[in-house]
Image (cartoon, rainbow, N blue to C red):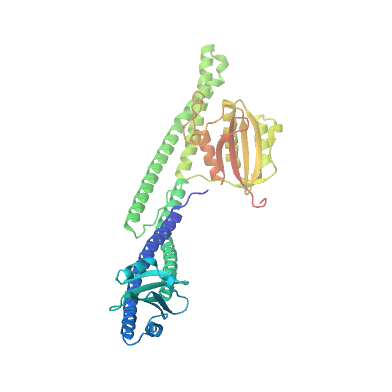
Amino acid sequence: MYPLTLRAKTILIGVVVAGVLSLVASAATFFLTREFLLRQRETGAVTQVLAAARLASSALTQSDESLGILSASAQILPGSRAALYQAGSWQISGVGFTNLDIPESLLLQLESGVSARQRAIVGSDISILVGFPLPNYLDTWFVGVVPLNELERSLEVLRTTLFVGSILASLGGGIIGNWLSRRMMEPLREFSSTAREVSLGDLTKRVNEPREPDLARIAQIFNEMTFSLQRRIDREARFGATVSHELRSPLTVIRTAADIIASVRSELPPSAQMSSDLLTLRVEAFEKILNDLIEISRYQSGSVEVNLEELSVRQLVETMASRKGIDLRLLEVEDVSVVVDARRFQQIFENIFKNAELYAGELDAIRGVRNKSEYELHFDDSGIGVTKDEQDKIFEPFLRGEHHAAVPGSGLGLTISLEHARSMGGELVASTSPTGGARFTLSLRIAETQS
């Protein structure tokens, strides 16, 4: 499961917060409104039933026809349902209502001579039952029934409206969160894109300062950092180029002197011959380091010119393998045209071969794998391998593995190889071979005619 992005989290938070707040507000609004309307309806019901009870009481003084009196009194009630208890018997007016629908607790209050009201279900309707003992009449009660169906329907509409409003508020929170996240992420996306280009070596990139003060300050700091880094790298590149150039002249003199001494080596005593051999080896090593430094300084100063051409990767590998004495039966490479600089490819091949020779004895195999628009060359050996912690570090200048410190070398070969690979639009990575040794994978772009 992929982790949520910052923008997705912002939108989700907007939806959740808006949804929770709207639900709380809707619930509070509904219950407060419901309570208020019910109280209002109960007050109205008491007034209506009281008016009907007074009418019934007044009519009883003029007639003893209780059923007719009840029917006349019930006419002023919504739903026209009422009950009159007199002399131990009930008179009922209205359909779907009997004295059995009257709650026992309400009857007990009426028996004690106290008016009462209570919500109850009459038939299938929720209603308010209000009872009054009739004055001047012993054991005589009037009970009116006021249905709440209309109020319940109104509350149902209100509940639905508030629920829909909560959903719309949640969607609104998501839309606002999306708008805010987009507004926030656009500068961050530019920061990320620019930082990536800077990490790939383009130190001329700068980010535009957004209108928001906080983000504008971050942009200023980022641009200042990039400018400082560019100035420092330029200074180091100029220093490396200057030192390399200044060392070239004395090295040429030393090299010439060493060659002259080596030309008369047979005429020298044994101790002098050993010194001559040692001098030649040291001069060659120093010359290799100096050439590597010059190559690195060219990449740092951006003065590298790449001569790209489309060549057969199998012919390139077979040619280099023949020069190094590698058994061609160890090669598993297709005949695919790739985009390369032949000189730089040769240096990469030689550096990888030299590493395998120094640390593992030799290469075990060179295998090619086609991967979409790239062709990958795997150089495998059976040495002690490269640990995961060292797989990235070994490409840094002058940094060598902990098991390789005793082996002579400048520590620049793999750094230059990586720069060569990237200058051709490819990549060079280290991993573990199937036999547990080191694997260096060189990725090259496949020519458009082959893709």
Vertical side of 127 occupied by 402: above or below:
above
Foreground of the two, 427 or 263: 427
Residue 12 pos. (x, y %): 44, 57
On the question of residue 34 being in view, the answer is no
Q: Is residue 319 left or right of residue 186?
A: right
Q: Quadrant of residue 213?
A: bottom left
Q: In the figure, 89 relative to 320: above or below?
A: below
Q: Nearer the viewer, residue 407 or 175?
A: 175
Residue 435's x, y, as percent? 62, 30
Does residue 375 sit above or below 280 in this rendering?
below
The structure residue drawn at horizontal position 43% and vertical position 60%, both measured from the top left corner, is 15
Furthest residue to the left?
A: 136
- Count of numbered badges drawn on the protein: 0
Q: Front-most of 309 and 107?
A: 107
Is 288 located above or below residue 214 in the figure?
above
Where's residue 79, x and y in %? 42, 80
- State the residue lying farthest toward the bottom: 62
Q: Visible in this render: residue 387?
A: yes
Left or right: residue 410 compared with residue 138:
right
- Coordinates of residue 382 in the picture (x, y in percent): 61, 28
